[in-house]
Image (cartoon, coloured by chain):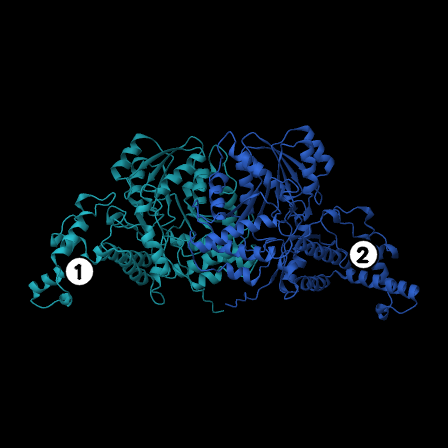
Chain colours: A cyan, B blue
Amino acid sequence: MTFHQAEHPLLVIPGSIEVSDDVLLANATPSQSHMSKSFVQTFGETIKMFRQVLVTERGQPFIVAGSGTLGWDMVASNLTEPGDEALVLHSGYFGQSFADCLETYGAKVTQLKAPVGQCPSREELVQALKAKKYKIVTITHVDTSTGVLSNPQMISEVVHEISPDTLIVLDGVCSVGSEVIRMDEWSLDVVMCASQKGLGVPPGLSLVCASERAIRIVETRKTKINSYFASWLNWLPVMRGYEQGKPVYFATPPIQIICALHTSLKEITSRPIEERWARHKQASIDFKQFVTDELGLKQVPSDPSIAANGMTAIYFPDGLSASDIIPRLLERGIVVAGGLHKEIKDKYFRIGHMGITVMDTKTRNDLEKVKDALRNVFKEAGYVQYFLAKYFVKSISSKHMENENNTSASESSLPPLDEANRRKLHAFYSSMALPGSSPDDGLQSIDSDNVNCDVR
Amino acid sequence: MTFHQAEHPLLVIPGSIEVSDDVLLANATPSQSHMSKSFVQTFGETIKMFRQVLVTERGQPFIVAGSGTLGWDMVASNLTEPGDEALVLHSGYFGQSFADCLETYGAKVTQLKAPVGQCPSREELVQALKAKKYKIVTITHVDTSTGVLSNPQMISEVVHEISPDTLIVLDGVCSVGSEVIRMDEWSLDVVMCASQKGLGVPPGLSLVCASERAIRIVETRKTKINSYFASWLNWLPVMRGYEQGKPVYFATPPIQIICALHTSLKEITSRPIEERWARHKQASIDFKQFVTDELGLKQVPSDPSIAANGMTAIYFPDGLSASDIIPRLLERGIVVAGGLHKEIKDKYFRIGHMGITVMDTKTRNDLEKVKDALRNVFKEAGYVQYFLAKYFVKSISSKHMENENNTSASESSLPPLDEANRRKLHAFYSSMALPGSSPDDGLQSIDSDNVNCDVR
């Protein structure tokens, strides 16, 4: 059957993301028995392909009806026993929630909190690990609330060096499928995620992968696992069974969404995963360049090196807020997300660029649509300074080019920037000291070199 | 869009069940934000309609990505505190599992176990409630492993009389939408179910409804709730928010399957729920009559009054087993379920008749297809006695009719039953003492009156 999903606004929140027609059609697979040969094969292949995406040979996947949140319960209830020490590397909202979940199951949690837009440094981590022995350390790979990207490879190296028995848990809800993850090579003990982000499937699945070491810890723990639905011991026979072609019952698996995941994973694993990561990275670089250089806006992550590749978190310029921008984008058929981190909730918005929005440039044009809409919407919202800035930059550029090449630049037909506008522009840059920004951002000055470098 | 689901074998296991094209298409709803106006309205309406199905005005629904099993975790983690006493009324496999789940969260469980095919009696319940004070009592409304139907109304009356503070929990996984449930009138504190059975939606949702009393218990408990994902306190603002038109975030809701549930509930609530119950009951009576009278087979429930209306659990006749019947049904495009209850696992099979298989007799003909397939498959498997029996009955009947009306019955053209066949038939009935059957089943004799009464 040729299936085309209904027309709808373009969804570019940092998950759920747009999904392909094929994946949606698989989500409308007719009813079938969870014990049927066909479904057993589908589920078994899905388990294997999930391993491929995480670049692990020995990890044990758990694919269960739920949401990303359920993965925290799995980690907390299986890997910690009441009283165990846990270190949460906090880079936003989701670090706090993971900590809350761990405490629910009796773990004693220390949070290593970074200021908004940052993640804990290597030095802080070293210090924390030397101060106390932890059963587990958790990393939010991409904190969806801030768009901050942590460095699990570095963290894992530090942990293995200082505290080799500590289990390393990567919350990859907003990173699996869009950020580089090498589970075995980085010696991660758990990678957990959900279906609706980088994997390009509707929401409704919790996906977790546990290392052999993590499974041994569960099998040899002193106290009973204090959850039933989240217990890996209940799911282990199911996952192993389906992978070996034999259905085992614990709870009815969510057939249709597993079929959808199967379809998406087939597409994802049909090409080297490195290619997917590179495509996400390039799309992110392009989009962020547009946001900072063309729109003159500031990202929430304090440094480009810690900005996620699957999403962009952007501060509103002074004088504008969510209500100026988000409804206007919606009118143009573009759905973005508002703020989530409570310290800056009303001061920024978020755009996701994962999955087919990035990968399918043959039949889709998502990010160009988003850019066009942003250009128009900011203009409409009265962000005139942006246009002045752009004008100013172009004017400077064309002057530079004229000087250097002694030819007329393409923008040279622009009318000259008069003194009144120049003053407005200066005032605008002076007002750009945004929450968390440093005075070094180079936006306080209209020195033409700085402008060229930081604004365009 | 006109959407027709792909051709596929007819699924008549006791869940997952067949779902309509409309529901499947809703499960392929394009991506949308969980904060969007459209989804907020869909989810809000879904919550309200779920209440209608349970005939409750004040119950608090929780609709969460998961499976039916997660409902047990919700009950155990929210309503019991470690050390609390729980009484599990056990009518099959799922009573044991519910007990295991309660114990996981620290409850002290007493199981009131009935023999296979039965549920605990009123007298046993009275005795149990008088012997000990219980925080909660749990009922498996329909135990999917046996097809046994409990009587929650009677149980609730007894509990309210003897132990009015005890919370009453109905596991309605295999009953909501197909069996009579009046949550308010029967003063039930929790009704829990899943999406893939009587509600006619793909698997992937845990649906729970809690009484005001149950919510008060959660809000005033002494110890912290010992689950994060299953905690009602985490979900309460979400459910109340969406119902009031305001999205609240705890975990990403499974958009598509909630859209599918919305579509199914709209269809279900478009007619009085009593009509749906009656249709399921009549279909069940018809189908069971076919199984017992025409096929001459025996049900697992020991008495028709405790047989579910949404499914039928049937013993194989002596000499036949799952491998004789189930693959042959599959060859004919009919998918039934094998045994699940470990005491009788290989001795019976199960057929579901819920949702559109029962309700949509305009465009579907599911149960007639199932009957035809069963007739042919049992014949093919060598169950010749059945045909002899049928022949014999018809022969007797026509003789009766001839005597009474002095006219020739329609079957009178059948050739006479000879002595050899009559002997085979006698031997067959003599061999029909099936597991759990009583000598009073009337199948030991070929007395013509008995045959007329019990076999046809």
Residue B303 sits above or below residue B387 on the image: above
Q: Chain of mark 1?
A: A
Q: Position of residue B300 (x, y in %)?
A: 71, 49
Q: Is residue A178 visible?
A: no
Residue B116 sits above or below residue B81 on the image: below
The answer to which of A240 and B27 lies nearer the viewer is B27
Q: Is residue A339 visible?
A: yes
The answer to which of B190 and A388 lies nearer the viewer is A388
The answer to which of A43 and A321 lies nearer the viewer is A321
Q: Residue A418, located in which quarter of the rendered image? A: bottom left
Q: Which residue is mark 2?
A: B455
* Residue furthest bottom as drawn: B413
**In which quadrant will I find the C terminus of chain B?**
bottom right
Q: Chain of mark 2?
A: B
Helix, strand or loop under label 2 = helix
Q: Which residue is mark 1?
A: A391
Cα–Cα span, label 2 and label 1:
92 Å
| Residue at 50% in and 51% down | B43
Instruction: Kindly identify the amino acid type of the residue bearing the numbered disc 2.
Output: Val
Give the class, few, some or many, for how many residues have Cα within 10 Å of label 1's Cα (few <14, many ≥20). Answer: some
Instruction: Kindly identify the amino acid type of the residue bearing the numbered disc 1.
Output: Tyr
* Residue furthest front as drawn: A420
| Residue at 93% in and 64% down | B403
